[in-house]
Image (cartoon, grey):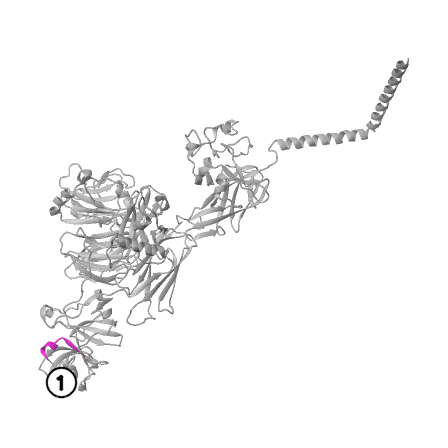
Amino acid sequence: INLTTELHSVLSCVSMKISCHLYNENQKDTLENRKKLLLLYTSAGLAPSIQIFNSTYSGVFYFRMKLVTFCSFSMHNQSTWTIDIPRRNITYNTDIAPIEEWFVRFTMHYGLNTFTTEGTLLDVLREPLLQWLLGKPMQSAEINALIPDVINITVSKCPCANDVAIIALICNDTVHGITISGFISRDTTWFNMTDSLCKDCAGLSLVNIILTNNHLIILTTLGLFISQDLRYPTERILNVCEFDDYFSANIWYNVQCLANKENYEGEKFRFENFYIYEMGREKRKKCNDPYTEWYSCLPYRFHGGKTLSRRVVTFLIDYQQNTGIGLITVQNKAMVSVHKITDHKLNRQTKFPVFWFPDPMFLPFGMFFHPGSHFLYVYGNQVWFSDDGGNTFMLLITLENETIIKTNMCVYSQSITFVTDKGSIFFAKAGLERYARLTTSRYNVFNLYYDHLGSLNIIALNESVSDNDIGFDGPLSPQYITEQQILFFEHIPLNGKSRNIQKSRFYDLHKGKVSIGSGTIVDVFHHEYPPQYLSSVIVDILKKFPFESENGILANSLSILKASNTTSALLSGANLFKPSDVEKSVVIPGLSSFMIVKILDNRTALADATMPDRVPFNKNFTSGMWFVYDFGTKNGRKWKITVDSCRYWVRELDNLPPNAIKYLDLTKTYNFRFRVTPINTAYPIFHLPLMKLVVGNPSLFIVKTKDYWDDTDSYTMEFSVTNTFYKQGKSSIAVVVKKASLVCDVSTIVITLKSGCSYSKSMHYISPVSISAQSWLHGDPIDQYGFKLLKQLPVNYRPPSKLGIAVPLTDNFYNADPSKPRMRDYFAGSKTSGAYKQCANKSTRAECNCSDNEKLSFFVAFSDCKEKALRMKYPVTKLPVHFRVGSENGYTPLVSPFLVTVTEVNHRTNWEVAGMDEGFAEKCINAAIVLFSQGSELFHFRVATIPGVSFCNLHDEFQIYVDDAPLAFPGQYLVSTVTAVLVGGIIFVAFMMQMYEINVWNKVKNKMRKKNKVSASETSAAVASTSS
């Protein structure tokens, strides 16, 4: 039962809708069968899931498990699971830029790994090339008319999205097609670029085309053309350089994906570090702006300044070690020269000693780095590879009368294909010291293409390549070493076309292959003794090799006699031999084996010994002590050599995505673990390491490794990578399973490590109180004592300045509303300061379009939208401020050795950090920052780390509103002054009265008595008058 086959999907501007169904391979894929499987697995609580991931991102989405009703159909008519994933759940970005194409993996419930189906997901809105119309669109009929004139096909893939490729037909016109599905579906759009390149195009023909991250580079017979930056569609192609003789021009480009570009990547050289070299010309002619700066890729002369004939075959840039690598021929000898690069120029001193290829017959044709890794390959009539940046090389392939002229690589599967001038196709894996011959193309015009998932196809035939038998017509003689290992000796051919061949046909090509399906070739030896045998191979026995059990001669006895040749012997017995026994081998366990080379009569045969020193002359061997094997060719070759099946299962124990990218900040350490489990091997191996580690730039990181065998007979390698140097750069680390077969899905795992700041690393303020986003936006939370935790900011609020609350001087508005008057806009300084951000050139607050995230943000860039602030009661003393650092690995506290600076965004100065000066603070964090504030209202702080202990410029902001403060200046001081004057005056008057003995109290009492007497007299007179 499967989900579906390999798929290629695209991400649109709104959402991605997916329907998924199960089908049984043994039944017809009918609607009824789909319904049955849907009900079966849904009732068991299972539904599909989709994982979307690339080197830095991974997300899992689940299909709806419940059965739903669609329109007028009942749930019984449902045959698929469905999911609708909004674009924002995958990515927020919509800008045009080189981005990684996502991988998608469908499984029946995430984690179970059942019914797994893989595919790709391409963001067509952001892919730069897809935004351009590079020429006049062409119909299929016009393409068919051009096919007879096509002399070659060239294909160039997008470095970050291999399903996006451009195919160019080399003919009299400049015609190219663009695909977004790796040529799997018929979606190729064809264009004629001739009119886009020139007005007078007489003699124009395409030579080569290269698609880089941001440019399309076209080499033609009339010159070099480079597009404008693909991120800014203008449909304009620039003619950069014109050549008098285009046959002497070439173009080289070291593929790298700049989707996660750092500031040290892609900026050292113009137009993404590719170089052009015209043979015999040191200066370029007619090179137009802006590409006017050219640098020589020829190294300095050797041999004491002697003038030597030199030709640059290929020149590449090693992005990891910052070196220029030149493949050069000097006086018909090939060499590789590696130079450090300073200010875009090659240093005079080589980084490594010059490597001269030892074989004078080696004719180099090109050189390339496997994308993403640090494996360097040089190819021609031989293939050499280096894993240390060009210091040393190892021979991989040797060809006769053929030269490799094309190569193609896949980042996902680490695969490499080589195509010769005779159409032979060879296959290898990055880092493995083995290869296979796949097939020979019967087409004169073709090219190979790897899509993003690693599927290899022939363009434009859409035909997959397959493995071939790489055996040869020649007799072999087996020689047992142990029960688990056997030697096969290659004998000089005795008949047929191979009779005159005196050169061994066992090569390193055969390492790791299976002979006759019963053993694995582990090593190849070339030797001159015994003289009848050209070479031999050691084979680990997987299954016992069959001998001729039905041969009647095995029932007889065998005698071994001396022959005139010291390395040959006479085999004698009664009616043993017949003419068809030539090239068969007689095997005697524990002694030398013999290949029958001539039948003298039916009783005697001449044979060549594989081990002449262990021939038991004049000894008789009865039936059961000797055996006959037929590894010859006279009776038809019954053996073959093919690529072995995968016998090593690799498991990455940290759930890394393919080609993962990890960022190492200063003092940061990453730990990685890989396990290899042998499966169906000849015998258990406990003394040999099964993996090796290849570091692209060893000077950038400290790598420590540990390996061991565990109780499950599995080999485990653990290694840690630490960044202890304040140096930016990148390095690949390749984990290579040395004995892995070429058919293994995973044989090399490449991890890219960048010394720098991860895009996901950030610093976050930890609020002293926990308040939900809903409460921030719509609530009015209080603590257990009834104290309000948030302060609603006034409209168009600006914090005070050092001149007072009524004199704001900051440019930052909070809770901005252009339709209402500016708050505290009394003085000239306040009127000339202050500027809106989101609300600039808006008439109302609604037009500011403040989102909830902007209202919650503490950053000053969103101050217009900020409506509330955390409320504190005056005075603020010993306020601990905590931060944490978030990354893809979770959150960690921001502590030592980080140094931070604390500033107030609005330039307020009446605050301080414990132990530091007011207004600005620099402090090493051990636990927390302790703030003191003597002011009131809003404080907006910005805390940032100091460079030197991290590559990240971490910072965050937070705000507090100090409320319930005493009267602001000058009210408090006026009240205090008046009170002091009154109290002082009273004390002064009392002192003077005491000094001059003035008894004010007595005078007051006397005055009161006199007043009372006068009042009594007046009262008596009135009474008397009344009586009368």
Measured as percent of width and height from the top left, residue 1018 is found at 87, 17
- Mark 1 residue crowding within 10 angstroms, few (<14) / some (14–19) / many (20+): some
Which of 550 and 445 lies nearest the eye of the viewer?
550
Q: Quadrant of the C terminus?
A: top right
| Residue 109 in view (yes/no) | no
What range of the chain is rendered magenta? 578-586
Q: Which residue is mark 1?
A: 573
Position of 422 compared to 105: left or right?
Answer: left
Position of 1002 compared to 71: left or right?
Answer: right
| Residue 855 included in the magenta stretch of the image | no
Q: Which quadrant holds residue 749?
A: bottom left
Q: Is residue 937 above or below residue 623?
A: above
Measured as percent of width and height from the top left, residue 210 is found at 23, 47
| Residue 325 in view (yes/no) | yes
Q: Total of numbered circles in the picture? A: 1
Q: Is residue 213 above or below residue 668?
A: above
Q: Residue at x 88, y 14 (%)?
A: 1026
Which residue is situated farthest in the top direction here?
A: 1028
The amino acid type, in three-letter code, at marker 1 is: Gly
Measured as percent of width and height from the top left, residue 342 is found at 32, 49
Q: Quadrant of the N terminus?
A: bottom left
Q: Secondary structure at mark 1?
A: loop
Measured as percent of width and height from the top left, residue 612 is found at 19, 79
| Residue 579 included in the magenta stretch of the image | yes
Which of 401 and 118 lies nearest the eye of the viewer?
118
Q: Which quadrant holds residue 704?
A: bottom left
Which of 304 and 282 lies nearest the eye of the viewer?
282
